[in-house]
Image (cartoon, grey):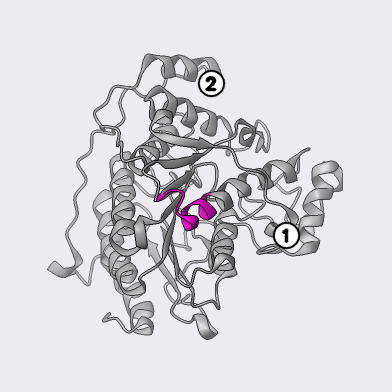
Amino acid sequence: MSGRAQLMWDDAVTGYDFGDSHPMDPVRLALTMGLVRAFGLDNAVDVVAAKPAGESTLRLVHREDYVAAVRAASADPRAADQNYGLGTVDDPAFVGMHEVSALIAGQSVAAAEAVWRGDTAHAVNFAGGLHHAMPGAAEGFCIYNDPALAIARLLELGAERVAYIDVDVHHGDGVQAVFWEDPRVLTVSLHEHPRTLFPQTGWPEETGSGAGEGAAVNVALPAGTGDAGWLRAFHAVVPELIADFRPQVLVTQHGADTHFEDPLAHLAVSLDAQRAVMESCHELAHAHTEGGRWVALGGGGYAVVDVVPRSWTHLVGIAAHAPVDPEAVIPSSWQDEVYARTRQLGPGRMTDGRMPSWQPWEAGYDPADRLDQAVRATRRAAFPLRGLLA
């Protein structure tokens, strides 16, 4: 394995732009890359711009008619077919939509290829993580499902066990759907409970079917869950599953919308807890995959100045084995960039000032506690299907 991580980046990914009134503002990507550069992390990684995913790659996951519909809407947004989820409030059509969506997908696929070949142990595409797109429809701000495409490419290359961990506040429904019957892919999603948040899926009882029964695991967290509960749930479920599955590659999705400042959801997680989970995913990759094979993706996140750039800059630093000190003062050059782009003032440090901790599951649980009830529901539904004690 190469000693340097790869950071997948092409300035053109900022063209993934649904319009001024849409919450997924591409400035979050530009500001993240700006902060990566401000801390010199671009010198600690190999920055790679991959080609867009081609037709044959897209069809590893997406139907031919859907790709054709995206192409048509991309050429003429007025032609968007809402039967495919295009031209909707969530997924407005725009000129060039196919090209930039394929470009983002191409970065994730290339990251997976590089990790599988051994060119690098870790690869990051924070522009990716668009986990809601279905084989035949756009959904939830997502046109092409780059995590699923990256995993499908790994399987095509010969991988027999790929684990996918999704800690976005929203359920990773598209990735789960693609691999619902595939025992080679373990999907684990921690998200706000479907009673209170889109896409209203990700119940503990969703565990896969057929040969893939037990290959989908869902932790549905109560609204209001903060650092201690989020970390407790992660450590009560994820490490045991990964140790048992023994993946050859770990693919993780790090949506920053679990944060207490995010305007579209209802968890109360800090930047510091997000960073702790990133570190845990890094450790899991080194502990359970050959050579530490890790593909790390972005995802949701709509506090586009205060949260997303800091969160994903920490992700890049961790993958580069050059972690950014949470107490680090953010360089003034980035503060100037924030103001120039947004007319807002950026945060001053790389921390929310929290020191997140949690009680391990092994110490016992409280049957009256809503968080513990959620964890118990997941373990009861999924663990016995994998031969593990609930």
Locate residue 215, reporting x and y percent: 45, 75
Residue on which disc 2 sits: 342
Give the camera-side residue of 162 and 70.
162
Residue 101: x and y in percent read: 67, 46
How crowded pointer 2 is (Cα within 10 Å; few <14, some 14-19, many 20+) is rated as: few
Choose between 73 and 107: the one closer to the eye: 107
Q: Is residue 304 above or below residue 355?
A: above
- The residue sitting at 22% across, 72% down in the picture is 367
Instruction: Give the magenta range.
Output: 111-121
**Is residue 240 left or right of 55 when viewed as pictured?**
left
Mark 2 or mark 1: name the one nearer the start of the chain. Answer: 1
Mark-to-mark CA distance, 2 and 1:
39 Å
Percent from the top left, x then y, of residue 368? 23, 69
Q: Nearer the viewer, mark 2 or mark 1?
A: 1
Q: What residue is drawn where x is 47% and y is 63%?
A: 195
Our reading of the magenta stretch's main secondary structure is helix
Determine the residue positioned at 49% across, 78% down. Answer: 183
Q: Is residue 88 left or right of residue 304?
A: right
Q: Quadrant of residue 18?
A: top right
Image disc number at residue 56: 1
**Picture quadrant of residue 179:** bottom right
What amino acid is found at the position of numbered circle 1 in the picture? Ser
Q: Position of residue 176 (x, y in %)?
A: 53, 67
Up-down: is 320 above or below 231?
A: above
Hey, what amino acid is under mark 2? Answer: Thr
> Regarding mark 1 in the picture, which secondary structure is present there?
helix
